[in-house]
Image: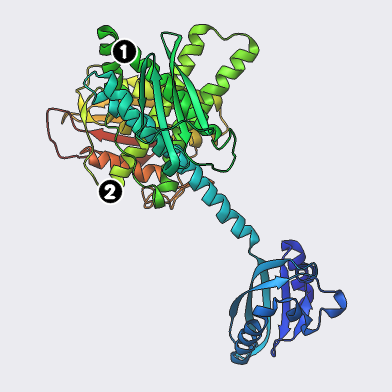
Amino acid sequence: MNGSIQALADLLKAAVFVADADGHPQYMSTQWRSLIDLKPTDSLTDRWQQAIHPDDRQSVAEQWLEATAQGRACEIQFRFQHNDGSMQDATLRATPIFDQTGHAQGYVGVCRDVREEQQKEAAFRELAHELNERVKELNCLYGISHIVEGSGGSLETVLRETVELLPRTWQYPEVASARIVLGEQKYAASDFKETRWSQAADLKVHGDVSGWVEVVYLEERPSRDEGPFLASERALLNAIAERLGHTVERLRSEEVRGEREAELRERLTHLARVGVMGEMASSIAHEVNQPLTAIATYAQAGRRLTEAGTMEPGAAIELLNRIAEDALRAGAIIHRLRDLVRKHDVSQVKCDVNELIRDVTHLATVDARLHDVTLRLALEKELPMVLADGVQIQQIVLNLVRNAVDSTVQIDATGKEVVVSTKRRDDGYVVVTVEDHGCGLPDDAEARLFQPFFTTKKGGMGLGLSISRTIAAAHGGRLWFERKSAGGTVFYLALPPAAEDHDVAK
């Protein structure tokens, strides 16, 4: 038996041991001896217990003896102390080997180093921290947008409220303060004072430097990327200064003000405070990944075109505009997802579904092209308007299209295609269809496809379709799918027309 266990231990590179019915070692794998600094000559002795930290040794011995006396499995957590004095957290699991009469004739066990798990937990905490920082940045940008919308056209109101908002977004808000200087005008937080821990960005109006935006720390903090400030805070401050510059331009011109209001209505609809992320961090990361992927794709495309020397000014502006739009869309997703999970009512306006699809397929087409998949639109003309949150409907379509592309990529065929179509049903409902000729769904997927955390993708979170169905229901609509006999899947999204209230029927 030991030979088989040794072969398995070598294959798995696991710290495996075998003990007799009394708990005395009969075999120790090389990994086990290496873990506890044990010589091969000591492998059949109880000296392994001497490697246990003195403070844990008695507890381990008592738990081990109790388990062997009762002939039961056990799990023991403790610390190893190596010859160099370093310590290592470990977990020992052992299970009895029973004879034909049901009596334990020995034990086989494994010892696991928990450092890797701890490292994963630390990495997750770091990811959660980074996500929280990004959310704070989005919250700041959207907060400024709300200030502008509620200012009644008063530039003074915008700047005064912005200096109060900025410190909350920086890493140490309790000692942060802010100031905005525009020409001869100065707007500062009530506790502002000049210090040597300062970060500033030029405020440009019509291309000329007209002032600056400044954040300071009132007390010393640990040095980071730029003094006590993070590199991401530099990028955020530059973005804030740029946005304020544009706001100044727009507020000083009635014509530009009209453009500003239209842009804000289109891009910053229903922007509100972003709530505590907490347990929602993973689902938000999943949903935000789609527009962030689009941002990365546009940036990579811009870099390739620039390196190739084929980047035209107009193309560069278009790429930057799309990157900016998708950054705003990512923030809108965060806010909408919070409302949906808490079952709040969504804010809906009249929307042209075809326009929403055309807009979102600018993103999906890039992704599809990279996978050699053609994305074809077959949109019925003169569809009725629907009451909808445009960002959320686009998220459903984008999720379905990318699922379809992923499925299509897995088949070996030429002319691979995903078709997005719209039509008006007899009952007035607008139906969006996403059809692929891909690998199809597993046999066991149909009943669980819309359940949270169920996924057929390697590394997938299993939240996209569940959230999409929730969004559809919140709009008085429905999301469902059908298998295709020739392979592939068709997803349907039905939305009621704006002027009527129908029961959803397949």
Question: In the image, is residue 200 above or below residue 172?
Answer: above
Mark before the other along the chain sequence, 1 or 2: 1
Pick the residue in front: 483 or 479.
479
Q: Which residue, given by chain and number where applicable, does mark 1 sit on?
A: 250
In the rendered view, does 299 fall on the left or right side of 355? right
Q: Which residue, given by chain and number where applicable, does mark 2 sit on?
A: 342
Q: Residue at x 69, y 79 (%)?
A: 54
Q: Position of residue 197 (x, y in %)?
A: 53, 34
Q: Position of residue 428 (x, y in %)?
A: 17, 28
Question: In the image, is residue 61 above or below residue 334?
Answer: below
Indicate the quadrant where residue 158 lies: top left
Q: Residue at x 29, y 19 (%)?
A: 155
Image quadrant holding the N terminus, namely bottom right
In the rendered view, does 451 fall on the left or right side of 4? left
Q: Residue at x 38, y 20 (%)?
A: 244
Q: Secondary structure at mark 1?
A: helix
Query: Badge 2: few (under 14), some or many (20 or more) residues near its Cα, within 10 Å?
Result: few
